[in-house]
Amino acid sequence: PEAKRLRTIGELGVMPGPIPPIPAVGAAIAGVTPGGLWSATSDEKGRFELEGIPAGRVRLIAIHPRYQQGLGAWLKVGSGSPLVPQVIRLVAAAELTGRLRGPYGGAVAGAWIHVSPVGGRGRHERRCTTDRRGAFRFFGIVGKVRVRVLASGYAPREQTLELLPGRRVELDLRLGKLGRELRGHVVDADGRDVVGALVQLSAPGVVTARAR
């Protein structure tokens, strides 16, 4: 038989800390059940409402970019009395921002920035690309993380740092050229500059050329 339509209402709050304890506006609320996923978005007062939840064991999950993921208690949904309104408290996460520059200080656009938790602990890697100013930004991350930078033509870079709840961390990352750089000067027998000479560098299995 078709499950009776039930309704659960609730609100979002945040734990006291560096970010003021105000409701999380626009948080995504998901109700996970064996029969599917029910979702809603919290309003300006942190309230949400889910309808049509079938009988069974369910759990609420709240997701917001500026907070750590919040989990509600497991609920047993029956076909009788209405469900008690639920409160999911979110803890502020860290914000990670930065700029990526080349060896001479110029912005590096289109580079991949990967942020992953050290040790895993079931959380997924986050990634984004730098904009034309070399800038990048991550929200909703906390704990010890590894930052990896991959950009075409540059040597990869990696560093580890600790992101504390409610804190903002700003990085100024510099990339080095891929491999070593060799410069020189082409002259003739009298020491005069030679314009347009083709200079080649050979190595086992590799030949590259550059016109000067």
Image (cartoon, rainbow, N blue to C red):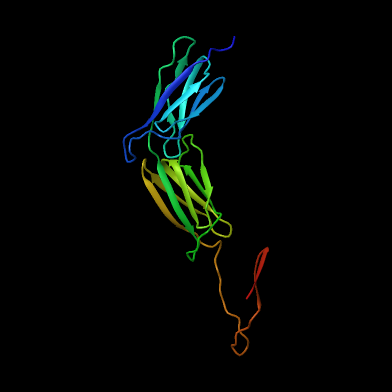
Determine whether 167 is above or below 122 in the image. below
Q: Is residue 40 above or below residue 162?
A: above
As drawn, which residue projects farthest toward the front? 44
**Residue 193 picture location, percent across and down:** 60, 84
Residue 198 placement (x, y as % from top left):
67, 76
- Rendered view: 131 above or below 80: below
Direction from residue 151 to residue 69 in the image, left or right: left
Residue in the image at 40% along x and 20% along y: 85
Quick one: 202 or 34, which is closer to the camera? 34
Q: Nearer the viewer, residue 152 or 121?
A: 152
- On the picture, is 13 further left or further right than 180? left
Location of residue 74 (image quadrant): top left
Could you tell me which quadrant the C terminus lies in? bottom right
Describe residue 80's horizontal placement relative to residue 201 as left or right.
left
Q: Is residue 103 above or below residue 6?
A: below
The residue depicted at 35 percent of the width and 35 percent of the height is 22
Q: Residue at x 32, y 41 (%)?
A: 18
Name the foreground residue: 47 vs 211: 47
- For the N terminus, the quadrant is top right
Q: Position of residue 103 (x, y in %)?
A: 49, 64
How many numbered marks does the figure carry? 0
Image position, residue 32 (x, y; %) = 51, 24
